[in-house]
Image: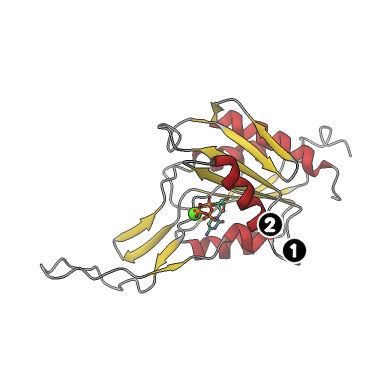
Amino acid sequence: GNHAAAGGALAGRHVLITSGPTHEPIDPVRYIANRSSGKQGHAIAAAAAAAGARVTLVSGPVSLPDPAGVETVHVESAREMLAAVEAALPADLAIFAAAVADWRVADAAPEKMKKDGGALRPLSLVENPDILATVAQRTGGRPGFVVGFAAETQNVIDYARAKLARKGCDLIVANDVGGTGVMGGDANTVHLVTPDGVETWPTLPKEEVASRLVAHLARQIAGKAE
Ligand code: CTP
Ligand code: CA
């Protein structure tokens, strides 16, 4: 139909986005986390709302305000993020921009650990659920289009292609975080990796990456059933 007349390229669509890091508790005052400001994911949520979508943003702990006009669900851990994502389905489009901690502490201490001057207690880690793969591989209720991110320090395109296949998503937004400035910075250089090929964009402000990505994804899902 004519989406522009209905208020934007994503009018009538539900877009689900994850953003930020997850925090995995060691004890009540300490945690393991990935570096992530949430800037890119939050900018995508704002851009999707501006394109007329109903947007659910599942955010780990960030110091950013909730984007205007976006239903924001705040979580801490990967398992909480997965539960919030599944509660927000169904969605027409799902974008997994969060930097999810790959591991959590198997036996987080219920009380604050004290130094005590003695031997360190080793942390035993267990792998977290893969939220993107879980959603992309759903047999019922899979979102119409599933997008992952891949932050890499080397072999960016090769690793992104491998992740695309392994996780079962439709597109990977790959970025090279090997240099300085991307993590927490305001600009991003991305490659859109699909089974059909690779499209490399110039270095752009994260807001510009967000609006271009939303326009690109709106075109991808435009042909699919409403
Ligand atoms: N992702 C996720 N849940 C996880 C780990 C990753 O949803 N437990 C998502 C991220 O949000 C991102 C994509 O998967 O969209 C790729 O994340 P990345 O960390 O690059 O992939 P991993 O499979 O964890 O591989 P590795 O960290 O070993 O490179
Ligand atoms: Ca990871």
Q: Where is residue 56 shown, x and y percent of the image?
A: 62, 51
Residue name at image x 43 percent, y 46 percent: 62
- Asked if 191 appears above or below 120 in the picture, the reply is above
Secondary structure of the residue carrying tag 2 is: loop
Disc 2 marks which residue? 168
Residue 71 in the image: x percent, y percent?
A: 60, 50
Q: Is residue 126 above or below residue 171?
A: below
Q: Residues within 10 Å of mark 2 (few under 14, many from 20)?
A: some
The residue wearing badge 1 is 141
Element under label 1? Answer: loop
For the point 77% across and 36% down, which residue is it?
9
In the image, 71: left or right of 63? right
Determine contact: label 2, label 1, CB under 8 Å. Answer: no
Residue 142: name its quadrant: bottom right
Q: Position of residue 138 (x, y in %)?
A: 71, 65
Quarter-wise, where is residue 73 in the image?
bottom right
Q: Residues within 10 Å of mark 1 (few under 14, many from 20)?
A: some
User: Where is the N terminus found, in terms of image quarters?
Assistant: top right
Given the image, on which type of amino acid does mark 2 rest? Gly
Q: Nearer the viewer, residue 178 or 110?
A: 178
In the rendered structure, the answer to whether residue 168 lies left or right of residue 43 reads: right
State which tag comes first along the sequence, 2 or 1.
1
Q: Is mark 2 within 8 Å of ligand 1?
A: no
- Distance (Cα) linking label 2 and label 1: 14 Å
Q: Residue at x 78, y 37 (%)?
A: 219
Which label sits in the foreground, 2 or 1?
Answer: 2
Q: Is residue 85 visible?
A: yes
Residue 67 seen = no
Q: In the drawing, does residue 97 fall left or right of residue 137?
A: left
Identified by mark 1, the residue type is: Gly
